[in-house]
Amino acid sequence: MITHINFCWCFAGWGTNEQLIIDILAHRNAAQRNLIRKTYREAYGEDLLKSLDEELSSDFERAVVLFTLDPAERDAFLAHEATKRFTSSHWVLMEIACTRSSHELFNVRKAYHDLYKKSLEEDVAHHTKGDYRKLLVPLVSAFRYQGEEVNMTLARSEAKILCEKISDKQYSDEEVIRIVTTRSKAQLNATLNHYNTAFGNAINK
């Protein structure tokens, strides 16, 4: 593979050749981009992302770096960025915590640890507060069951707990947090469906 040599030409002398960077990266899949990074490090002793960061700027840099990262690293990068803003971007953290599978989220936590030498949970706890912290820390820490098996007795009992807490406007009660952050998606769906059937309203109402 000569692509790492092409990257050297991208950065040589007369200003960064952005079109060549696009031509190289935009036509490679994730496995090929990882191989390019590995080969570049072996050839030049530096992470390709560091070179890109030094040579590029503004939105083009951000797009290239995010595209080059693998999915777990990308989520780790975005989560780290979200916690470092003056106002933490809770929506970014919430999307990562709620939409990734248990294995994907585990890989995000590992990538975060490798990249920033501390835990994702640590930074989320430090840069959030109040109800967001109560919800987000266990969400990003969870390793939930991913299967379809459901306990209907548990679904009925926890739907009742949710109804009682929500009726009293105790939205951040520890029991609500426990149910939302520890149950599998299949179990949560069963609980929320029973809530709708038994109490006459969808829980979001």
Image (cartoon, rainbow, N blue to C red):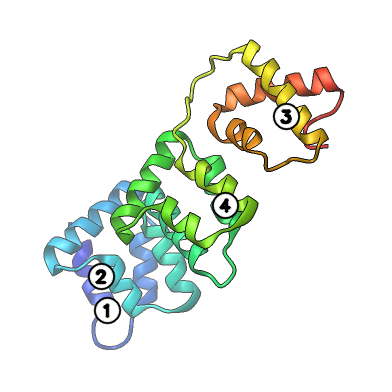
Task: Determine which residue is flagged by label 3.
Answer: 162
Q: Residue at x 36, y 59 (%)?
A: 68
Three-letter amino acid code at the position of disc 4? Arg
In front: mark 3 or mark 2? 3
Task: Determine which residue is flagged by label 2.
Answer: 7
Mark 4 to mark 3 CA distance (whole Å)? 20 Å
Seen as rendered, the residue at the extreme right is 200
Q: Seen in the image, is 11 located left or right of residue 1? A: right
Q: Earlier in the sequence, mark 4 or mark 2?
A: 2
Classify the position of the N terminus by image quarter. Answer: bottom left
User: For this rendering, which residue is in front, 17 or 49?
Assistant: 49
Mark 2 to mark 1 CA distance (whole Å)? 7 Å
Mark 3 to mark 2 CA distance (whole Å)? 56 Å
Mark 3 to mark 1 CA distance (whole Å)? 58 Å
Q: Is residue 167 above or below residue 158?
A: below
User: For this rendering, which residue is in front, 17 or 57?
Assistant: 57
Task: Determine which residue is flagged by label 4.
Answer: 133
